[in-house]
Image: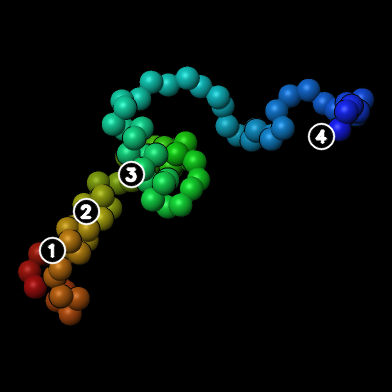
Amino acid sequence: MKREYDFRGGKRGPVVSVSKRKTRITIRLDEEILAWFRSQVNRAGGGSYQTLVNEALRQHIQRTREPLEKTLRRVIREELRAASVPSHITIDNKGWP
């Protein structure tokens, strides 16, 4: 360590600049919710749980804005994928294979 440091050219404030598109808020979350987001970050090898919370909120907003038909189609695709329906089976617009 140096004996003295020259701070004449220094600036006050945070070392890392904060995005102008983001606003600092105080929010209370259930401990389980926060723990889940933090575990996701740890499993991914690092990052920011706040970014994951932001992305989850963004996806929720996007899904609540999508038309009902699009929502239903998305949910059906997800459910079919989860049920492992063979990809060679197609379903017509009346719901029959």
Q: Which residue is mark 4?
A: 1
Question: Can you give x and y, in whole percent of width and height, for residue 62 in the image?
Answer: 38, 43
**52, 21: nearer the viewer:** 52
Quadrant location, the C terminus? bottom left
The three-letter amino acid code for the residue at tag 1 is Ala
Q: Which residue is mark 3?
A: 63
Foreground: disc 2 or disc 1:
1
Q: Which residue is mark 1?
A: 83
Residue 63, quarter of picture? top left
Residue 3, quarter of picture? top right
What whole-number distance in Å separates the C-alpha atoms at marks 3 and 4? 54 Å
Q: Earlier in the sequence, mark 2 or mark 1?
A: 2
Is disc 4 placed on a helix, strand or loop?
Answer: loop
Q: Which residue is mark 2?
A: 75
Q: From this viewpoint, is residue 62 visible?
A: no
How crowded pointer 1 is (Cα within 10 Å; few <14, some 14-19, many 20+) is rated as few
Is disc 3 placed on a helix, strand or loop?
Answer: helix
